[in-house]
Amino acid sequence: MDEKSLKKLLEKVRKGSCGIAEAIKQMKHWPAETMDFACLDHHRALRTGFPEVVYGEDKSAEQIIAIIKAMLEKPSVVMATRVNPEKAAQVCEKVAGLDYYETAGMLAGNTDKVFEHECRGTILVMSAGTSDMAVAEEAFYTARYLGNPVKKLYDVGVAGMHRLLSQTELLHQAAVLIVAAGMEGALPSVVAGLVDKPVIAVPTSVGYGASFGGITALLGMLNSCAPGLAVVNIDNGFGAGCMAATINRM
Amino acid sequence: MDEKSLKKLLEKVRKGSCGIAEAIKQMKHWPAETMDFACLDHHRALRTGFPEVVYGEDKSAEQIIAIIKAMLEKPSVVMATRVNPEKAAQVCEKVAGLDYYETAGMLAGNTDKVFEHECRGTILVMSAGTSDMAVAEEAFYTARYLGNPVKKLYDVGVAGMHRLLSQTELLHQAAVLIVAAGMEGALPSVVAGLVDKPVIAVPTSVGYGASFGGITALLGMLNSCAPGLAVVNIDNGFGAGCMAATINRM
Amino acid sequence: MDEKSLKKLLEKVRKGSCGIAEAIKQMKHWPAETMDFACLDHHRALRTGFPEVVYGEDKSAEQIIAIIKAMLEKPSVVMATRVNPEKAAQVCEKVAGLDYYETAGMLAGNTDKVFEHECRGTILVMSAGTSDMAVAEEAFYTARYLGNPVKKLYDVGVAGMHRLLSQTELLHQAAVLIVAAGMEGALPSVVAGLVDKPVIAVPTSVGYGASFGGITALLGMLNSCAPGLAVVNIDNGFGAGCMAATINRM
Amino acid sequence: MDEKSLKKLLEKVRKGSCGIAEAIKQMKHWPAETMDFACLDHHRALRTGFPEVVYGEDKSAEQIIAIIKAMLEKPSVVMATRVNPEKAAQVCEKVAGLDYYETAGMLAGNTDKVFEHECRGTILVMSAGTSDMAVAEEAFYTARYLGNPVKKLYDVGVAGMHRLLSQTELLHQAAVLIVAAGMEGALPSVVAGLVDKPVIAVPTSVGYGASFGGITALLGMLNSCAPGLAVVNIDNGFGAGCMAATINRM
Amino acid sequence: MDEKSLKKLLEKVRKGSCGIAEAIKQMKHWPAETMDFACLDHHRALRTGFPEVVYGEDKSAEQIIAIIKAMLEKPSVVMATRVNPEKAAQVCEKVAGLDYYETAGMLAGNTDKVFEHECRGTILVMSAGTSDMAVAEEAFYTARYLGNPVKKLYDVGVAGMHRLLSQTELLHQAAVLIVAAGMEGALPSVVAGLVDKPVIAVPTSVGYGASFGGITALLGMLNSCAPGLAVVNIDNGFGAGCMAATINRM
Amino acid sequence: MDEKSLKKLLEKVRKGSCGIAEAIKQMKHWPAETMDFACLDHHRALRTGFPEVVYGEDKSAEQIIAIIKAMLEKPSVVMATRVNPEKAAQVCEKVAGLDYYETAGMLAGNTDKVFEHECRGTILVMSAGTSDMAVAEEAFYTARYLGNPVKKLYDVGVAGMHRLLSQTELLHQAAVLIVAAGMEGALPSVVAGLVDKPVIAVPTSVGYGASFGGITALLGMLNSCAPGLAVVNIDNGFGAGCMAATINRM
Amino acid sequence: MDEKSLKKLLEKVRKGSCGIAEAIKQMKHWPAETMDFACLDHHRALRTGFPEVVYGEDKSAEQIIAIIKAMLEKPSVVMATRVNPEKAAQVCEKVAGLDYYETAGMLAGNTDKVFEHECRGTILVMSAGTSDMAVAEEAFYTARYLGNPVKKLYDVGVAGMHRLLSQTELLHQAAVLIVAAGMEGALPSVVAGLVDKPVIAVPTSVGYGASFGGITALLGMLNSCAPGLAVVNIDNGFGAGCMAATINRM
Amino acid sequence: MDEKSLKKLLEKVRKGSCGIAEAIKQMKHWPAETMDFACLDHHRALRTGFPEVVYGEDKSAEQIIAIIKAMLEKPSVVMATRVNPEKAAQVCEKVAGLDYYETAGMLAGNTDKVFEHECRGTILVMSAGTSDMAVAEEAFYTARYLGNPVKKLYDVGVAGMHRLLSQTELLHQAAVLIVAAGMEGALPSVVAGLVDKPVIAVPTSVGYGASFGGITALLGMLNSCAPGLAVVNIDNGFGAGCMAATINRM
């Protein structure tokens, strides 16, 4: 049922050609979807200023170009994740004003339209090794374009604890921490033992042999005995950025 | 929002104290749950005459007794699955008029109130080995008390094909077939290759070693190249019975 | 034993040179395969009008061309699944009158020869995300060319429930539903909770990290607590279409 | 190096018997552990007022009694998790003033000494089925005794969407949501699609067959495409409560 | 179609009231199961003298007693596998003349009626450790009561190669070798590298930690690069005994 | 210790310059490897006339050419497995007199020098589907060039039982059966239920989704309840051929 | 071939009744096992003074008593692992002079006969949590009774880094380190990053949910990027103690 | 806090403007990272003369060139692992004086600057098959450039025990043994049963089918019942070399 039908029914009620009991009965039998426009409206309202995001993995450069062009019309930041350099070059040739972050594999546009929520503080994005940086950077730019102040601290894995311990001040200043690690995935546990802020752990597929494409890191993080830590999917920097932004929003 | 509020709003519309545009706007902002009574009503309507089912696994005899007593008040068949003989004895001592099917681990009551839908035909429940009978029987009684004509054909596993082949007529007469098998789980494939009716495959946890509690049977069934076959969870005789009943309903 | 031997034996019976008891005894000792011609006949009869299907994955364009040409001689629809655009182009160049559905990866010919069975109703094919469409389309065209009325409803995943809820009427009109979903694979459960028709759940390999090529979706579907749902193999749109068609046939 | 040694060195500095450069050199060579008392102090300071928690699973009633008695001396709430009814009865007999929550399997003492942080809002604890309640209750009481306002909403699984949809207002009022689910584990995804607050997903080991003791639920939650969701270990209600409390703290 | 119908048809043929062509046509349309009595006969013939075997795992002492009593009437050896000492004691109290092999968990009766086939030679049953003996013994007695000369060689695991190497003569004398091993499961590979006779590898569930109930041993055996080796299920001493007997039969 | 040293010692014994006790003592302390030449000799003796085999997977065409050329000097058949058509073409260009079996991916030379052992009978190689033929053919040519009479029966999978049942005579004539199957891997079970000869089951990696590269077929075969069946590694046609040949050798 | 045969042959050589060439030829054809007595001797020599060890898991108290009594006759330490308190009490009642270490589950006797090798230094045994102590203690007493100086440092897991960092001096003093950890298993990585001595990592089965009985800890340790670390089986404290002792031996 | 601040504080102490108690209090509150320079110094000291190592897998030739050039300035050996021939050629063209080991996939420079520690003895690197040589060679050159005497013994797998047994002397001469094996991974167990020196087991990803990329070999090694054996990650020749070097260092 669309708005027109509802209007018609209400007009009948006003004119008295439909009794109230009858109107209620009819409305009861509307399928749930009659509420859809409301939901959508509400939904859209909630999301005002939020970036529109394209998942670039399975899409051709042409498809990304078409979608991004449409999105740039709206007054919101536009992001595309998992865009490799080849596709990015093709897209940037056709669409002006985009920034490409190669390590993150992300494109961003309308970056002057970031919606600045009131925030709790800074989101600190950490990585255990240099190879985890791709995932960390995806989290970094996601959080940034969702309107958060962001900092980064990379290559502070547990096999060289002194590097991490020399930065505890930076850790304590953050409101939310995202920690990406592959291989044994121990860094988030150690970090969560040092701070009393929420830690989002992101396992990465970095490693070989019994790292099983990130499963080892994922399991390690799920089994952390440090309180104040939760986990997202393997290589899901985008999801970590979203979760951190949701937590950081006042 | 409840019905009363809706009535009030409609009265205002009728009296003209609320414009139609205003009414629509208000209705748009009702949370989705305002439609709940409708959903519930509809839902209940759909389910008229359907058995009420208790999952007995994690429940004490006392809990099962309390729930079944309440259910028996309603004009529908009552079923309880995964009830072991000890609990069943305790329940039957306190609640009169129940039947207990030990192999199936099921209790049934109000069995004179089975809702007889118009059906496509008979549901044939098969098992590969005698050890798969518990699961097959759960499927059998579930289908029966959901109002279907049911037949059974047990212990016709693939290691002795002649037993199965001697019953092909019975197979062809069924409208829907449920096939329970553990170990290598090959029976449903063979059956689906012999008939042109829907086959519901139920892997069972029967076996040892590399049967992995039914995983091997489950994987075998999912990989069947026979058309007209779909799979339910390991040991899920109840689910198979429900699926078969849903298919068999006209 | 071949037909000739059988004829000889019967001739002896007619002439009286072999007693009836003796003939029965001899026939008892024929190996089972003597019945093969019967089985084959019967089988073929059952399948009259059914499409012939080629599994294109491991076959070269040349092989597909050869098989399809032979098939097109028969008065049945011809389908080839898992044909990529390159192969499809080569095939269509050599074989006239074929339709190619790129998203589904399917070729179809003799499409005017679809065998129209009497059906229960419409098969509705749904997908959770746009990436699941390839599998959904394979199911869609399989069901269609097996002689069923088909509809589709794509991109109605559980992370945006309003999109699904706005289409409940469409859901209720279907006789059988095929629901394809990757990642967490939750859509079939939700759909099966909304309708009282059989739901065929198809896990897809869409996702990354801990989606494990569709295992997560598969496990989720198998564990659904919604009644009236069964599952086929990961990415097995063809199998889902066959199962739905088998159910939908009167 | 202990405080005494440090004091001696500083005295030498003051007396001039040790030059500043020399003092710095010596301090450089102190092993890292000389800072331990500082760390401990700092740590303790951070945690003032936080409950002391006993993991009861592997401990005997005697051990729990001894630990809890010591803890009750301190001016903080005391919690013990995974305490079964038998052990709880033994503990309560020996230690006065404890509350036992049987479903949660938790003991609590000094409950008048909950440290009331300034909070963002209410933590809503949800469960998909009644069997998931044990885990949900563990999360509930953990969050409560960590000083948070808490509400609960149980048995709103995805196979009956109307139950959930009728409570969306309650969902929108929460500052943080904990969602426990077993079997297919789809509820957190659906909830995260309805709200814009952080959702902590807790897979439970509820289920049978291919639920694999909670692995299926865990994988489903990790693969959720809903933003603003992160996951803790299977059955880890305590960890979910801690994470939610960490997020909810201002 | 049963024998009576066949007889009637043949009578018509004899009387000439049914032409031969017509009779053949009718017989072609008999369902496959009409051949069942033949199959059964043939089957039984093949198996003359073979032991009857009861799988005791899931059966009560009462059930085993009933089945064994019936079996002992026939002129064949009777075996029951996976019978624990308690059940065995109960069975032996009620049924006279049974032997119980405790390590093997097997009962045997009518042992004077072993069918002595002509054999290729001796079957040698080996085990890596003393804990693998249960499985090895099951294989040993299975092979023995299937009518084979059998020898045993236990506790010759690869961590002490000298024990094995001191017995190579015994190895070379065997016609078929059964090798049971748990943990890393390396013994069958080593043995198959020393002999040129068929080796049946039986993984056992002996071990802890990453032995995963025999999976490690199973995988090790499947990956053996030694020629002339094949594998049965974990702990499947019975299956190994059957396979060896099938090979050893002339 | 080499032969020369042994000779010297024996000469001393003969001359009386070394007592017998002393000689024994010295020989006791020879490391085990002194027996190596004996072992090697013996080993070589055992293997006289056996083909030399190259595993071509990881080797370049150049490497294969070098090895095969050397092998062709010896009076034995030469085989190379897992050689793709490109490499095969390169090899055949440089080495005269080789046969290439493309489906099997095998090269063979000196094929007039097959060592004809006395055999028990024919080895029958079967496959469930046409896609399993590569593995079946590897087994076929391995068995053939190990000196066995071989037959083949392909594409007789369980989803169309009539194809298999029409060939039971062929099955009964074989002395050993090799059965290759992918997907659900049920064919070997069915075959082992029809014959009383040893069956070597070879799982193949044919399939998709939950076939997991042959794991499903492997598990199905290991769980077969048919006696007289053992299993080799996934896609290990060569191993199956060796095992069958070892069994078939008199 | 036994010593007697060898003697006979040598006597013939001495007497000239067997030529040297002939003797060598005969010896070449002795099976490898003729060297067995030598191997055994050598083996025994190597192991002089080493403890005899009983694996108590699958053995009854009676069996343990019998074995230990025999072992105590020899001049070596005696150890029994995996002996629970009930069995230990029974054993100690019958055998005098045994020590029982309850947490380690170990019995030791002849403890005054420890063979004191020359050692590199102290073996430090560490554990992440109190629940890992059972495994750590098994390693501790194994190393001690293999003749090594041992120290322990327990409950220093990574979620509270300050506890570990305050003990770095102790870490640096060890010659070999054994580190037991369950759950995420991160401690060995951190330790190996702090020291430059060999670290033996022992995963323990401590944990719940996705700790999978120690698999998570095992995988984490295998994936450590810290150099100088190797891993033993889950809960294998005994193996860790043996490896450390082997390394520590001069 | 940096050195400057520490200096200032000490100056105040010397001048008496800061009391000792106050100074201690301030130092207590320095964050742990103030000790970082010490840690780093210490760390660097510990590592003097150690090679610098580049993990080449994920790096471009350009990146490797830049890093190696910088490293070559320092007076230590330089190693790069996992460098394929193409990258190696590019690197060697731009950087003079490098050695490339193709099988090992390693580059080495400054090889005249190997730091020769005092060592226990020789490290023996063994491999089961020729395909395991790549991993073995990585271990070999790692150990060599970490300053150890190294030997190799390849292609001595368990399916031909005589090859291994003929080399036991070489085995007994080694101080530490590294054993690389794929497929069933049994070689390290056998070796550890022959020697009384530490054995580092390295599973390799060599194999197919159920070798699962090295998991089978890994599990086999973890389950070895031979004492004195520990395991590193699949294909981790570098880690094995480091562990062996750490053990071999005096």
Image (tube, coloured by chain):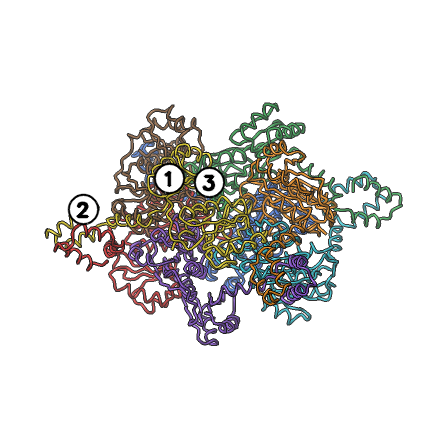
Chain colours: A yellow, B red, C brown, D purple, E blue, F green, G cyan, H orange
Residue type beneath disc 3: Tyr
Q: Find the distance from the CA under tag 1 to the CA under tag 2.
A: 36 Å
> D135 or B215: which is nearer to us?
D135
The subunit carrying tag 1 is C
Tell me how far mark 1 sits from mark 3, CA to CA.
33 Å
Question: Which numbered disc covers residue C135?
Answer: 1
**Which quarter of the figure has residue A75?**
top left
Position of residue D60 measured from the top left corner of the image (x, y, whole percent): 52, 69
Horizontal relation, residue F67 to residue G115: left or right: left
G155, above or below F72, in the image: below
Residue D56 visible, this orientation: no
Q: Are marks 1 and 2 on the same chain?
A: no
In the rendered image, residues at marks 3 and 2 fall on the same chain: yes
Residue at coordinates 39% horizontally, 51% vertically from top-left? B154
Disc nearest the viewer among 1 and 2: 2
Say which residue label 3 marks: A101
What residue would you read off at disc 2?
Answer: A5
